[in-house]
Structures are given as structure tokens and as C-alpha cells.
Amino acid sequence: MDNNMQPFAPQPSSRPDQESQPAQPSGSTIDPQLPPAMEPQQNQNNFQQGTTGSLDNQGGPTIHNTGVPLESPILAPTHFDGIKDPNIQGQAGTNPAMVASAAKQPMDNEKLFKMLSIIFGALAFVGIVLGIWSLVSNMGTSKKLAAAQADLNNKNAIIAKIEADTGASITSPDNVPAYAAITDTIYIPEWGISFKIPEDLENVSYTVDQKYRPQICFTGHKTGIKYFPAFADIDQNTATLGCVTRVATYEGDSDKDSGMSFGQPIYSYGDYNYFYNAPTTHFSQDASEQGLEDTAVQIIKNMVSGNISHYE
């Protein structure tokens, strides 16, 4: 036999007598004379023998088992890696979870869009509410600032007027000059109001200061006293015997920061209310003089509460 012949190549039959026999329905046959499987050394010695066989009745080769193992196994022709039939469901390489996820993706995007729309809508509503609240708050603050600025301008005008009339330089409430009433009526041009001095009060003096808010403070004593008491001397009794304070109407009846009352309401005109405040302590140390001081305080209270009026 030729050693160059390839294994399993069909060889012409050495038995010509089988060519005239009729075709058999059976397939390939195994030669019963072949020896059993050999040991590895025998297989190596007989590796060059090749296959033996004959043509079957159909004219094809008859394959005989030589007992020689193949060096490489023959894989079954059923592994078509990478080949996918679109008509086959569930074939390798197709992930059902990915298909389901891709199918749900438009719905998930729609839900996300609706959720974001609701969130942005809520934020926009909150922003509008805060904007309106801020606008209203700023309007109220602007009104307060305008009123406070107008009040400050009035105070500065009072100081300027006093300095022009007296020639004094007012730098603090302690050096506000005092006015002595020379007629039976006290006119306060900065406020546009006047006080009628009662007949039972004499030696009336007053100051216009701005310790906290614009106010007018008075001193005097009852008519008929033979001497001039110290409590009626405005240069000595700087606390005076009673004051009238002017407050803008929007501030109400009490201070918003401290909660303290502005005093007893006595008059209201235009954008301002006027309050009376009595002294809290006696100036006089002598008990008998304290009685005269109390009488002067009551007369001044009657004057500012009952004899106040507006003038142009």
C-alpha cells in the first residue's frame, strides 16, 4: 500500500467478484479479521498503514475500523457559533431581560418626565408664593422707611429751627435751649399745634428735644406762690413736669421693639398721634414742696390735654 495515501480515501476494491453482485440495502461493514485495539506503542508503529476497505455494493467505499485512534476529536456538526436564525425563538445570544427592558424604556421615560414636571411645577409655585410674599413685605418695609425718613427730616428741621432762633449749637438733648412763654399761647410751628396756657399756671418754660421721638416738655408752678421753686426751673429740673410726644399713626399706641406704651393719647391730627407722659419721680426733696410739684404737674396735664389745637 502507498504510504502517501490519505486516510479514509476511497480505494478500488481488490475483489472484483463483488462488482457483479446485486446492491445490498445495508451500509458499511466491518472486517471481522481486524485485530483488537492496539497498545499506544503498536498504534504509533501502525500509524502509517492507513485504512483498508472496499467499495460497497452502491459503489462507495466501505470503511473498516483499523483500531487506530485519531489525534484530534471530531466535533459534532451541531455547533454553529455566531449563526443565528431569526425564525428561532430563544436562541443563544438573545437576552429576554434586555428585550423586556428595551420594551419598557419608553414607559419609564414617560413616568420620569411626568415626575419631573410635577416637581418643577411645585418649585415654580413655591417660587411664585415667595415672590409675592417678598413683594408685599418689601412694600410694607418701604412705607415704614419712608415714614421714618419723614420723621427724621422733621426732627432735623426742629433742631435747625431752634439753632436759628437761639444761636445755640445742639449736639445732644442736654444742651437743648429752653423757651420761656411770653404770651398766653405756646406755638409749635414745627408741629403746627398750639397750647393755651391756663390762668392758674405761671413762669411756664418748655424745651423741644428729640431724646427718643420729637417731644415738648414743660415746667411751671401754680399762680400765687411767693417764690420761684426749683422744680419749676427748667435749667435745674431737666426732667421737667410732663411731656407731649408725637408719634406717626402707623406705629400705633406702643413701641414695637420694646412693647412699651407711648403714653396717654391726648390728640390726633393728620399722620400723627400725640401722647402725654407724666414725670415718674419727684424733683423736690422737701415733702411740702413735693405737694406744690404735684399741683404743677396736674395743671400742665390739663393744659396739654384740653387746650391743644392745630393751626396753619
Image (cartoon, grey):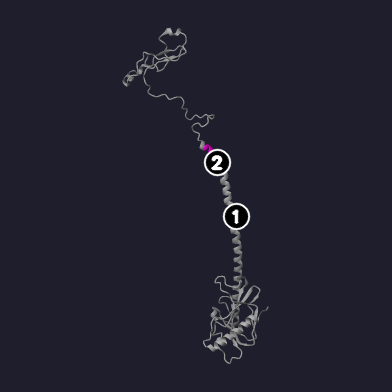
Residue behind mark 2: 105
Whether residue 296 can be seen here: yes
Q: Main secondary structure of the magenta part?
A: helix
Q: In front here: 101 or 8?
A: 101
Q: Residue at x 56, y 87 (%)?
A: 291
The part of the image, by quadrant, that contains residue 205 is bottom right
Q: Position of residue 32 (x, y in %)?
A: 38, 13
Identify which residue, 246 or 103, lies in the foreground.
103
For disc 2, the neighbor class at 10 Å (few under 14, some 14 to 19, many from 20) is: few
Which of 260/155 is in front? Answer: 260
Residue sitting at x 56%, y 44%: 109
Query: Are circles 2 and 1 on residues that touch, CB within 8 Å?
Result: no
Q: Which quadrant of the view contains residue 108? A: top right
Placement of the C terminus among the 4 image quadrants:
bottom right
Q: Amino acid at mark 1?
A: Phe
Q: Amino acid at mark 2?
A: Gln
Q: Where is residue 237? Give x, y as percent.
A: 54, 84
Q: Residue 136, position in %: x, y?
A: 61, 62
**Residue 206 position within the rendered picture, expressed as x and y whole percent measured from the top left:** 59, 83
Q: Which residue is most to the left?
A: 41
Q: Which residue is mark 1?
A: 125
Q: How many angstroms separate mark 2 from mark 1 (CA)?
A: 30 Å
The span shown in magenta is: 98-108
Q: Which mark is residue 16?
A: none
Whether the magenta-drawn stretch holds residue 149 is answered as no
**Element on which disc 2 rests:** helix
Vertical side of 211 occupied by 94: above or below: above
Residue at the image point whose x is 60% and y is 61% from the top? 133
